[in-house]
Amino acid sequence: MKRTAFSLLPLAFSLFCLCAPAPAFAAQPATRDADKIIHVSMISCFAEGHPVSTRVWQPWIAELKARTNGRLVITLLPPDSIGPGRGYFEATQRGLAGIGHQAVSLTRWQLPATSVLDIPSSMANSLAASDAFWTLYETSPEMQAEFREIKLLALHSFAPSQFNMTRGNITMLDDFRDKRMLATSAEQARILRALGAKPRIMHYTGYKDLLDRGLANGCLLPLGALRDYGADKYVTNLTLANIYLGACWLGMNREVYESLPPDCRAAVDESSGRKLSMALGQALLEFNRQNLKALTANGVAINKITIAERVRWLNLIIPPTRDEWFKLAERRKLKNAEDLYRRSRAIFEEAANKYAHLN
């Protein structure tokens, strides 16, 4: 029954797309007129005031406009303005949005190969993960095939989720036992359960109330999201483990991309890929540091675990998350899943070592 309900999500969103009016700047294909202004809409999971928008989206949009002499104009729409976030992938495929940006986990059924990016690894920061994610994409036909209808522009990770505690303290594995922890997804719940905690899945907009009322000991959440929704007011200490780095994609509708004049396509190509992925990783790395500094200034105690303890935790959480991914790969009839997983581990390990000084 659960699988049936999940499989109906793309159909439900398709019906929404057919019934809902397209935004004014949905995706205007290019014409042969070299002077024609081309309007392309963009939808992102980050709001306009988020550092990713101010430090990456806005400069990138300005760069594309400048490099095309004002002919390529990208308009950033508010989140959820074309429907729920889990529909952004299909919206971009269909051209309801010219450019889309969203978490891989929200459409993992459609992106089984790309979902390998969500399996925890030794990588501990968004710069390492963003570099590794793009490297894996460049060398993986399995992932490239999933973006047939989308010109992939970047892959990056979110800032790492941390163990933010209102009641109790976590510095060792045994500290997780029987802790009631809030999680935003099944993937996070699986991680918490493997560590011995008792997870409850819900959207983080509701964390503040549950933490305030003492109905949860803590939550697994990036520090930016913790502060954005006011849940940090109820956190007394947090443990920096950098265990979970969820993946995010950015892409342009393939038809819109191919309809662009050659110089506009060149501008998109030269400003995206690894370059844009790394800019996103860097912005989120700096944002994470700013949030940590602000929390410390507000009296939140910071716990750091040893490398050996982190390895111990990873050895517990990787097997169940890996096994769940292999089940997804089997259900979606993904070929070469074993090989893709092995390649990802080698690339992730190399990136973890390369960027370890930033942890």
Image (cartoon, grey):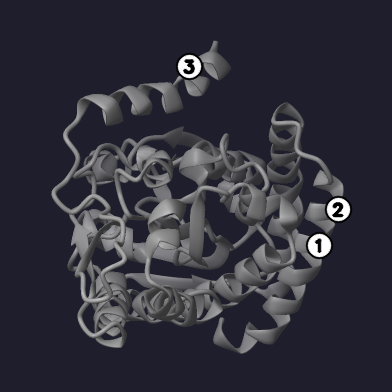
- Is disc 2 placed on a helix, strand or loop? helix
x, y (%) of residue 326?
76, 38
Instruction: Name which residue lies at 76% across and 45% down.
Output: 319
> Tags 1 and 2 in contact by the CB under 8 Å rule?
yes
Q: Is residue 94 left or right of residue 96?
A: right
Q: Is residue 299 above or below residue 38?
A: below
Residue position marked by numbered label 3 in the rendering: 5
- Is disc 1 placed on a helix, strand or loop? helix
x, y (%) of residue 271?
43, 81
Residue position marked by numbered label 2 in the rendering: 339
Q: For residue 187, what is the image quadrant?
A: top right
Instruction: State which quarter of the image contains the N terminus.
Output: top right
On residue 343, the disc is: 1
Instruction: State which quarter of the image contains the C terminus.
Output: bottom right
Q: Amino acid at mark 3?
A: Ala
- Nearer to me, 298 or 243: 243
Instruction: Name which residue lies at 40% across and 49% down.
Output: 218
Q: Is residue 189 left or right of residue 353?
A: left
- Is disc 3 placed on a helix, strand or loop? helix
Q: Amino acid at mark 2?
A: Asp
> Tags 1 and 3 in contact by the CB under 8 Å rule?
no
Is residue 102 at all visible to an observer of this figure? no
Q: Is residue 143 left or right of residue 21?
A: right
Q: Is residue 296 left or right of residue 276?
A: left
Instruction: Name which residue lies at 36% across and 65% down.
Output: 223
Q: Is residue 112 above or below residue 101?
A: above
Q: Amino acid at mark 1?
A: Arg
